[in-house]
Amino acid sequence: SAIHDLQAVFRLGNDVAESPTMIRMLIGFALTAIATDGAEQWIARPDAPNLYWALNSLPKPFIDPRPALDGEAAYARSVMPQTHDNVQLRDLWDDQVKAFGLPHDRGVAEFAKIAQRAKVLQQGGDPAAVAASLVVPAMAKSHSAFTRINRRLAGLQAVEAVRLYGADHAGKLPTKLADIIAVPVPTDPITGKPFVYAVTPDGFTLEAPPPAGEIANPANSFRYNVSIRKK
């Protein structure tokens, strides 16, 4: 019953997010976060079946942002046709869409450049340019939420890869994630490197540190402390 509920909420999050408005995409992100919370609770329960292959079968990235981005662009053209004729505004929007497909650090850097261009457009006083530039901060936040979803799912799959290794090696854990060769171990989508992993006296920890220059908080980092029951 629990796994069917998780399937339903993951499916709902994906379906709601991949629709033609940004607000629905954000709601889909929130629903997916709820499902991911449930997956964490599942993994934390003693004797819980391993979710590695279930997580591995999810789309990568889990949510395709293009339906929402394309839908917003179509809406803007319908209410402000001049945005389609303005090359600067089209470039501004296209570069924001492009940022969603870049590695996280490059996407963040791209949005920083876009924000500077948006300020210049605002100073021109053209109503369409001002409206287009005001969308940039919301798009940057949506990009961050998009990355957080993929990072959490990758982190859970990495945890389950370690559990699979332990099950195949009589409870012995890998000394490092690179020791796991039976299945692919996801890397951290933000750093592009393996998650921070360490064996502890009673299990292991797996950590996703905050991006460089940021103070750790629940939105930009996480740490799993996993205890392995001795048999």
Image (cartoon, helix red, strand yellow):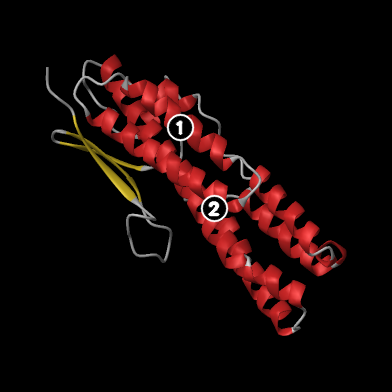
The residue located at (50%, 43%) in the rendering is 28
Q: Secondary structure at mark 2?
A: helix
Please tell me in which quadrant of the rendered image residue 155 appears.
top left
- What residue is rendered at 84% in x and 61% in y? 84
Of tags 1 and 2, the one toward the viewer is 1
- The residue lying toward the viewer, choosing from 201 and 92, is 92
Does residue 23 appear anywhere in the picture? yes
Residue 61 seen by the camera: no
Q: Is residue 22 above or below residue 36?
A: below
Whether tag 1 and tag 2 are in contact, CB under 8 A, the answer is no
Q: Could you tell me residue 101's position as x and y percent?
A: 64, 47
Task: Please indicate whether residue 75 sits to the left or right of residue 40 in the image.
Answer: right
- Quadrant of residue 196 in the image? top left
Bin the neighbour count of mark 2 within 10 Å (Cα to Cα): few under 14, some 14-19, many 20 and up.
Answer: many
Name the kind of residue labelled 2 in the image.
Answer: His
**Which residue is identified by label 1?**
10
List the residue tagged with mark 2: 104
Could you say which is closer to the camera, residue 34 or residue 44? 34
Task: Say which amino acid is labelled 1.
Answer: Phe
